[in-house]
Protein backbone atom coordinates (compact mmCIF):
# COMPACT_ATOMS: atom_id res chain seq x y z
CA UNK A 1 0.00 0.00 0.00
CA UNK A 2 1.03 3.58 -0.56
CA UNK A 3 -0.18 7.14 -0.52
CA UNK A 4 -2.07 8.01 -3.69
CA UNK A 5 -0.82 10.55 -6.20
CA UNK A 6 -2.67 12.72 -8.68
CA UNK A 7 -2.12 10.15 -11.46
CA UNK A 8 -4.20 7.64 -9.44
CA UNK A 9 -7.34 9.79 -9.64
CA UNK A 10 -9.20 7.89 -12.39
CA UNK A 11 -8.50 4.48 -10.83
CA UNK A 12 -9.47 5.66 -7.33
CA UNK A 13 -12.71 7.22 -8.60
CA UNK A 14 -13.59 4.01 -10.47
CA UNK A 15 -12.98 1.91 -7.34
CA UNK A 16 -15.10 4.16 -5.13
CA UNK A 17 -17.97 4.30 -7.64
CA UNK A 18 -18.11 0.51 -7.99
CA UNK A 19 -17.63 -0.22 -4.29
CA UNK A 20 -20.43 2.19 -3.27
CA UNK A 21 -22.89 1.25 -6.02
CA UNK A 22 -25.18 -0.54 -3.52
CA UNK A 23 -24.48 1.76 -0.55
CA UNK A 24 -27.72 3.30 0.79
CA UNK A 25 -26.15 6.69 1.56
CA UNK A 26 -24.60 7.00 -1.88
CA UNK A 27 -27.88 5.90 -3.47
CA UNK A 28 -29.66 8.62 -1.43
CA UNK A 29 -27.15 11.30 -2.40
CA UNK A 30 -26.84 10.37 -6.07
CA UNK A 31 -30.19 8.97 -7.23
CA UNK A 32 -31.41 8.92 -9.90
CA UNK A 33 -28.13 9.76 -11.71
CA UNK A 34 -25.61 7.59 -9.87
CA UNK A 35 -23.30 7.11 -12.85
CA UNK A 36 -23.04 10.89 -13.32
CA UNK A 37 -23.00 12.13 -9.74
CA UNK A 38 -21.08 9.43 -7.82
CA UNK A 39 -17.87 9.97 -9.83
CA UNK A 40 -18.14 13.69 -9.13
CA UNK A 41 -18.29 13.11 -5.37
CA UNK A 42 -15.52 10.50 -5.41
CA UNK A 43 -13.36 12.89 -7.44
CA UNK A 44 -14.09 15.82 -5.13
CA UNK A 45 -13.17 13.80 -2.05
CA UNK A 46 -9.96 12.62 -3.74
CA UNK A 47 -9.03 16.14 -4.89
CA UNK A 48 -9.44 17.55 -1.39
CA UNK A 49 -7.27 14.90 0.26
CA UNK A 50 -4.62 13.64 -2.14
CA UNK A 51 -2.05 16.45 -1.95
CA UNK A 52 -1.93 16.21 1.85
CA UNK A 53 -1.20 12.47 1.66
CA UNK A 54 -4.56 11.53 3.17
CA UNK A 55 -5.52 9.04 0.43
CA UNK A 56 -4.10 5.54 0.72
CA UNK A 57 -4.30 2.84 -1.95
CA UNK A 58 -3.08 -0.65 -2.69
CA UNK A 59 -0.79 -0.63 -5.71
CA UNK A 60 -3.51 -1.26 -8.30
CA UNK A 61 -5.98 1.13 -6.56
CA UNK A 62 -8.51 -1.66 -6.04
CA UNK A 63 -8.76 -0.55 -2.40
CA UNK A 64 -8.71 3.02 -1.19
CA UNK A 65 -8.99 4.82 2.14
CA UNK A 66 -9.58 8.57 2.23
CA UNK A 67 -8.96 10.20 5.60
CA UNK A 68 -9.45 13.56 7.24
CA UNK A 69 -6.81 14.17 9.91
CA UNK A 70 -7.50 15.81 13.28
CA UNK A 71 -8.17 19.46 12.60
CA UNK A 72 -9.29 18.82 9.01
CA UNK A 73 -7.58 18.58 5.66
CA UNK A 74 -4.88 21.11 4.80
CA UNK A 75 -6.28 22.74 1.66
CA UNK A 76 -7.15 26.38 1.21
CA UNK A 77 -10.78 27.43 1.36
CA UNK A 78 -10.45 28.59 -2.26
CA UNK A 79 -9.58 25.08 -3.38
CA UNK A 80 -12.52 23.61 -1.49
CA UNK A 81 -14.84 26.29 -2.88
CA UNK A 82 -13.75 25.47 -6.44
CA UNK A 83 -14.15 21.71 -5.93
CA UNK A 84 -17.63 22.04 -4.44
CA UNK A 85 -18.73 24.69 -6.98
CA UNK A 86 -17.88 22.28 -9.80
CA UNK A 87 -19.67 19.42 -8.04
CA UNK A 88 -22.79 21.54 -7.54
CA UNK A 89 -22.84 22.84 -11.11
CA UNK A 90 -22.53 19.40 -12.68
CA UNK A 91 -24.54 17.30 -10.21
CA UNK A 92 -27.46 19.72 -9.99
CA UNK A 93 -29.24 21.39 -7.12
CA UNK A 94 -31.17 18.32 -5.95
CA UNK A 95 -28.01 16.22 -5.53
CA UNK A 96 -26.26 19.15 -3.87
CA UNK A 97 -29.07 19.50 -1.33
CA UNK A 98 -29.06 15.76 -0.54
CA UNK A 99 -25.29 15.87 0.00
CA UNK A 100 -25.67 18.94 2.23
CA UNK A 101 -28.37 17.20 4.29
CA UNK A 102 -26.21 14.09 4.70
CA UNK A 103 -23.20 16.18 5.75
CA UNK A 104 -25.33 18.17 8.21
CA UNK A 105 -26.55 14.98 9.85
CA UNK A 106 -23.03 13.53 10.10
CA UNK A 107 -21.62 16.77 11.50
CA UNK A 108 -24.31 16.73 14.20
CA UNK A 109 -22.79 13.60 15.78
CA UNK A 110 -19.10 14.21 15.11
CA UNK A 111 -17.13 14.57 18.32
CA UNK A 112 -15.46 17.87 19.09
CA UNK A 113 -12.33 16.07 20.30
CA UNK A 114 -9.47 15.48 17.83
CA UNK A 115 -9.92 12.30 15.78
CA UNK A 116 -9.09 10.75 12.42
CA UNK A 117 -12.18 10.59 10.20
CA UNK A 118 -12.38 7.83 7.58
CA UNK A 119 -14.49 9.45 4.88
CA UNK A 120 -14.15 6.62 2.36
CA UNK A 121 -13.12 2.99 2.59
CA UNK A 122 -13.70 1.27 -0.73
CA UNK A 123 -12.63 -2.03 -2.26
CA UNK A 124 -13.68 -3.12 -5.71
CA UNK A 125 -16.36 -5.83 -5.31
CA UNK A 126 -14.31 -8.57 -6.97
CA UNK A 127 -11.41 -7.92 -4.54
CA UNK A 128 -13.41 -7.86 -1.31
CA UNK A 129 -12.74 -10.46 1.37
CA UNK A 130 -8.98 -10.56 0.80
CA UNK A 131 -7.87 -8.39 3.72
CA UNK A 132 -7.24 -5.29 1.63
CA UNK A 133 -9.47 -3.08 3.81
CA UNK A 134 -7.53 -3.97 6.94
CA UNK A 135 -4.22 -3.41 5.16
CA UNK A 136 -5.21 -0.06 3.69
CA UNK A 137 -6.29 1.23 7.11
CA UNK A 138 -3.12 0.17 8.91
CA UNK A 139 -0.89 3.24 8.33
CA UNK A 140 -3.36 5.77 9.73
CA UNK A 141 -4.71 3.48 12.46
CA UNK A 142 -1.15 2.95 13.71
CA UNK A 143 -0.58 6.72 13.64
CA UNK A 144 -3.82 7.28 15.58
CA UNK A 145 -2.81 4.63 18.12
CA UNK A 146 0.60 6.23 18.56
CA UNK A 147 -1.00 9.64 19.13
CA UNK A 148 -3.81 8.18 21.32
CA UNK A 149 -6.56 9.41 18.97
CA UNK A 150 -9.87 7.86 17.98
CA UNK A 151 -10.65 6.88 14.41
CA UNK A 152 -14.25 7.51 13.35
CA UNK A 153 -16.49 6.83 10.38
CA UNK A 154 -20.12 6.56 9.40
CA UNK A 155 -21.91 3.87 7.45
CA UNK A 156 -25.41 3.39 6.09
CA UNK A 157 -24.87 -0.21 5.07
CA UNK A 158 -25.84 -2.66 7.82
CA UNK A 159 -23.62 -5.38 6.34
CA UNK A 160 -20.58 -3.11 6.88
CA UNK A 161 -21.01 -3.10 10.64
CA UNK A 162 -19.52 -6.59 11.25
CA UNK A 163 -16.50 -5.74 9.06
CA UNK A 164 -15.92 -2.53 10.97
CA UNK A 165 -16.40 -4.34 14.29
CA UNK A 166 -13.59 -6.75 13.32
CA UNK A 167 -11.45 -3.66 12.69
CA UNK A 168 -12.26 -2.25 16.13
CA UNK A 169 -15.00 0.26 15.17
CA UNK A 170 -18.03 0.14 17.43
CA UNK A 171 -21.39 1.93 17.11
CA UNK A 172 -21.37 5.26 18.89
CA UNK A 173 -24.49 7.08 17.67
CA UNK A 174 -27.39 6.88 15.25
CA UNK A 175 -27.36 9.54 12.54
CA UNK A 176 -30.71 11.01 11.50
CA UNK A 177 -30.57 11.91 7.80
CA UNK A 178 -33.81 13.63 6.78
CA UNK A 179 -35.23 11.58 3.92
CA UNK A 180 -32.15 9.36 3.95
CA UNK A 181 -31.24 5.87 5.09
CA UNK A 182 -30.50 4.73 8.64
CA UNK A 183 -26.87 5.66 9.29
CA UNK A 184 -24.49 4.96 12.17
CA UNK A 185 -21.46 6.75 13.58
CA UNK A 186 -18.71 4.30 14.58
CA UNK A 187 -15.64 4.92 16.71
CA UNK A 188 -12.40 3.01 17.17
CA UNK A 189 -10.57 4.03 20.33
CA UNK A 190 -6.79 3.91 20.22
CA UNK A 191 -5.25 0.54 21.04
Image: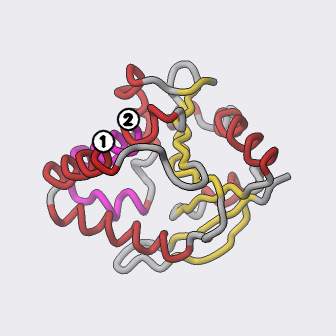
Magenta segment range? 25-46
Examine the residues drawn in magenta and state their main secondary structure. helix
User: Which residue is depicted at the point 44% across and 34% down?
Assistant: 15
Return the residue at label 1.
39
Residue 7: horizontal and vertical position, in percent? 38, 20
Horizontal and vertical percent position of residue 50: 45, 34
Residue pictured at 27% horizontal, 44% vertical: 40
> As displayed, is residue 112 above or below residue 137?
below
Q: Secondary structure at mark 2?
A: helix
Quarter assignment of residue 187: bottom right
Label placed on residue 184: none
CB atoms at circles 2 and 1 under 8 Å apart?
yes
Q: Position of residue 19 (x, y in %)?
A: 46, 42
- Please give the label number shown on residue 13: 2
Label 1 environment density (alpha carbons within 10 Å; few <14, some 14–19, many ≥20)? many
- On screen, residue 178 above or below 25: below
Left or right of 94 on screen, residue 73: right
**Residue 177 higher or lower than 25, as above or below:** below
Q: CA distance from mark 2 to mark 1?
A: 6 Å
Amino acid sequence: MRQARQFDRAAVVATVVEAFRDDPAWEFMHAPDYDLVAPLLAGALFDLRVDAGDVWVVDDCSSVAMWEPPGGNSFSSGVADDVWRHYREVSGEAAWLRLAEYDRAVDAVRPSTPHWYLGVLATRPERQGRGQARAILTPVVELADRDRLDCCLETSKPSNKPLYARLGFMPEADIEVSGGPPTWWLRRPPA
